[in-house]
Image: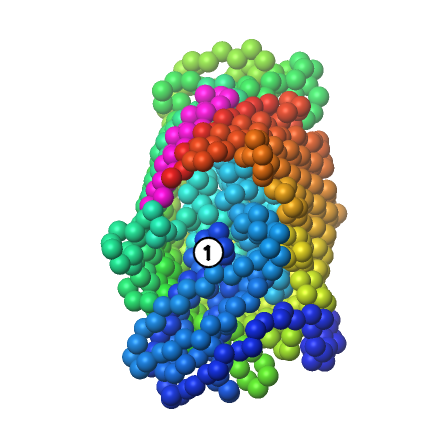
Amino acid sequence: MRNLIALLTVLIPLAAQPPAQQHQTAATPACTLASQKFEATLSGTVSDTSGAALAGATVSVSCGAFRVETRTGVNGAYTLALPMGTLPVRVSSARFATTERAVTLAADSTAQADFTLRPEDVHSSVSVVAQIDYIAEETNSGAKLDLPLLEIPQSITVVTRKVLDDQGAVRLDDALRNVAGIMPGGYYDGWDYYRIRGFDSSFTTYLDGLRGGNGTADEIGGLETVEVMKGPSSALYGQGVLGGLVNLRSKRPKSDAFLNLEYTGGSFAFNSPSVDFGGSLNRSRTLYGRVFALDRRQDSFVDYARLHRAYVAPSVTWRITPATSLTLLGRYQQDNGRHAFPLPAQGTVLPNINGEIPVSRYVGETGNDDNSVHEDNRQLGWEFTHQFREGFRVRQNGRVAAYRQIWKNLLYPGFMDVDERTLYRYPLSYDQNWKNYAIDTSADGVFHTGAIRHEVVVGVDYFRNPTVFSGESIDFSDMSQYTPIDLFRPVYGQSKTSALIPAYAGHTLMQFTGLYFQDHLRLGQRLTVTAGGRMNFTSNRDLPDPGHSSSTFTPRIGANYQLLPGLALYGSYSRSFLPQSGRVYEAGAENGTFAPPEKGRQWEGGLKSSLLNGRLMSTLALYDLRRGNVLTADLGHPNFSIVTGQQRSRGVEAESTFLLRGGWSLTTAYAFNNAKVTEDNTIPVGTPTQNAPRHAFNLWTRYEIQRGWAKGLGIGLGGRRYGDQSGDLFNTFHLPGYGLLEGSLSYRVGHFGIQFNAYNLTNTRYFTGSYDNLYVKPGAPRSGRVTVRWSF
């Protein structure tokens, strides 16, 4: 904290210096104020010359000492409460020329004023349009305010819909590979596994700003963006892991009518038709909707594995008044199939006297009820916004979700025979139901205290997660109940050795409540300071037991200093906390007591840039994370834990997206991460954290011809390289590093487009993640997919 205070002491005096460059605008129109009361409403949209909405554009009105401003939302819309009179409205956004217009307002009137901004460089209009597709300069997630990424003292990456489409992304893993500091991929199908800055962050994925489905594999076809906030986000979002947070943003309705038809087919019997359509539902264009739906059937490179997914996401927006809107977001996802299982380390990443195990090897059984998976996900969410006349805004987003998982006769690896070819498996069936109730209500606004401009948000949120689960398996002490399989010459169809018996059952209830506050201060032209915190209240129960409650405060403070226009130095300090379900031994208590929450802290600093009229976006981040209260085994009391573990992660991340002229884009991401155990009861100090390579690099470049007979022809090429990974908690074996190449070829003309994506061009044998020496997950061999699109 002392280091950050010293930094602010240096930067605040510098903030009084004039900026190195200012935009030149026409003379401000004359203004008249008939009163000081907010008696009128001005609303409208801001777009570029192509008609695309500009999110985060600043809309301001000033007349003498009177001044009020706001930012456009993700749909480019704005609303201002104003006095009556003739007032100049000024609209500005990075990379675009500022414009001003006089608007006359009468008492109790509602006026509409739409603005179109032109690029500062008229020769870069193609690049500006591409920027909207490939680069996001604004986000609401990092500060719960519509702020430029350049002003948020945290490393944040936004993967846009255009990037997902160009790369043919199907899973969340495919999106996250574009982000520095993330290691996607785990040891098991059916879940979205990923690590951020060396720590597992899989089970706290957020959807539309609210906690999601505990790591279940979300369909990304219905997403607009994937946002990654690195480091602790507990100051605004509460309970969460230290490494970072992933927020998925759903597609929103549009008032203009559109229809997109798409079909994708490819390797391993991949078939996925989808439709995306919407538009206004009434003549006044105040009610508009959207529906995205797909039906995907696919096999796997692993024998006998398959998946059938049905997905539909309806949404509707109602602009009740120019100052009030309500959006409903529905989501239904059903998965049925048979998951692939991990393989032993011997024969994959370790030597085996019998040779290599094929990555296509299936170690389950093939009966109709064997390894069968059924998952059901139903959600209804809402977003409500109201703009008050005084210039403040109230927002609420909430969601009710119900999940069901039924897995039958899954054959898990139990132990390996000394012959290194016979794997003994045990069956497990389980049924799990859980519900999520989440709501977040906040108020935000802009005001001034002297020369200091404040953008403030205050809010309260609540999350409730009741879960009922049960499982059946075998008597693990009876070796005769394990089912063997030859890994090199498998014979399927073996009968079960005995009936399953109850293994576990329970009913849990987690509840989180948070009160948060944040102030984004602008001190002069160059310096912004972001400070805030959150009071967290947590309850964790194994019903009917009374459970455990705790509370903690998680702060964040940071600063951004603009060295040059579009180049900023930033630094921040933040803390995290995460409730734990483990138990600590206590004399006289049969089940012990709940462990205290895991806590962490982070220092982060670096550089951010938005240069060349927004065509070059980059971030360089250095960080130091300390993770405490990590549970370790209680050697004196089996089945209990003690709170002695500590881990540390230090590293450097560099990300850049460069939109060159003429339809060429280049995206790079590199991360160096040194995450290791610093204190533990059983794991040696210095052991690297699991599945966290020290070095990771990703590159994606794409070129599309803009003119001539070949206009619309595009080609893309990408590559990834990951270093060695620790294979288990004790680092007894490694997953070797690997590199992958991929490419794309596309053509679009008019309403039609076709695209071919190829993956793992060199057919590299590699392994993406592991849990221990029986759980090593192979990666897919060479494959390809073709996508055909019609857009109207």
Q: Is residue 189 left or right of residue 644?
A: left
Q: Position of residue 175 (x, y in %)?
A: 55, 41
Q: Is residue 18 left or right of residue 320?
A: right
Q: Quadrant of the C terminus?
A: top left
* Residue drawn at the location 55% of the way across and 42% of the way down: 163
Q: Is residue 260 magenta?
A: yes
Q: Choose between 486 and 6: the one closer to the eye.
A: 6
Vertical order, 475 against 175 (above or below): above
* Residue at which label 1 appears: 53
Q: Secondary structure at mark 1?
A: loop
* Residue drawn at the location 41% of the way across and 37% of the way down: 791
Q: Position of residue 85 (x, y in %)?
A: 38, 83
Rendered image quadrant of residue 42: bottom left
Q: Is residue 112 left or right of residue 482?
A: left
Vertical order, 158 against 83 (above or below): above
Q: Position of residue 74 (x, y in %)?
A: 45, 58
Residue range of the region highlighted in magenta in the rendering: 258-278
- The answer to whether residue 31 of the structure is visible from this angle is yes
Q: Is residue 197 magenta?
A: no
